[in-house]
Image: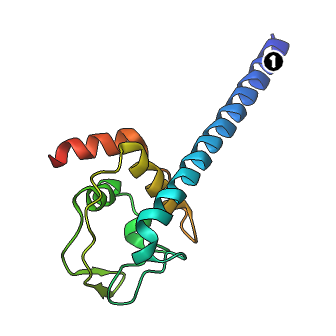
Amino acid sequence: MQRIYITFVFVFLFVAGASAQSGNKLVAASAARGKTVYLQRCMVCHQADGGGVPKLNAPLDASTAVNGSDVAKLIKYIVKGFADRVEIDGELYSNAMPAAADLTDQQIADVLTFIRSNWSNKAGPVTTLQVKQTRSKLK
């Protein structure tokens, strides 16, 4: 009986490890695709280092808004744009962010996964399901 239990535990740990590695590869692939979107659509304003432009374009690196749990708000900013003056981490930013509603759910999930896991950010990935659900509420 103990031998069966040990075998079960070993198989469980092996499968769990393989799933984690597979998940890590999926997140890495999403972030790699997101980097391409970032370079094409976001870098001009938010800069290559995610530092933004003081008083104009908010930084994405080390931002509580980016690293926070309200992913829906980030998705909304991409889909609808943002024109209000905003305070982030004690600094005011006033440049409007144009809407990028033409991006697919996958592209939005990928770019947010890249942003939330790049530079000093350590936030979790964003899924296409999260984007789809949020986008459906914005219409």
Taking the image as shown, residue 70 lies to the left or right of residue 34, namely: left
Q: Is residue 98 above or below residue 109?
A: below
Q: Is residue 134 left or right of residue 34?
A: left
Horizontal arrangement in the rendering, residue 30 relative to residue 103 (left or right): right
Which residue is the site of mark 1?
7
On screen, residue 88 versus residue 62, left or right, reads: left
Task: Please provide percent x and percent y for residue 5.
Answer: 77, 17
Q: Residue at x 33, y 89 (%)?
A: 55
In the rendered image, the vertical position of residue 77 relative to residue 7, given as above or below: below
Q: Position of residue 57 (x, y in %)?
A: 35, 80
From this viewpoint, which residue is outermost toward the front? Answer: 40
Q: Nearer the viewer, residue 76 or 47?
A: 47
Residue at 26 percent across and 67 percent down: it is: 98
Which amino acid lies under the numbered mark 1 shown in the image of this protein? Thr
Q: Position of residue 100 (x, y in %)?
A: 30, 58
Snapshot quadrant of residue 80: bottom left
Residue at the outermost left position? 139
Quadrant in the picture for the N terminus: top right
Between 39 and 130, the one lying in front of the other is 39
Who is closer to the viewer here, 100 or 13?
A: 100
* Mark 1 residue element: helix
Label 1 crowding class (10 Å Cα cut-off): few <14, some 14-19, many 20+?
Answer: few
Q: How many marks overall?
A: 1
Q: Residue at x 75, y 18 (%)?
A: 8
Which residue is found at the position 46% from the left and 63% from the top?
Answer: 40
Q: Position of residue 123 (x, y in %)?
A: 50, 59
Query: Which residue of the protein is positioned furthest toward the right in this rendering?
Result: 3
Q: Residue furthest top?
A: 1
Q: Taking 86 as reference, is 121 above or below it?
A: above
Give the colour scheme of this rendering: rainbow
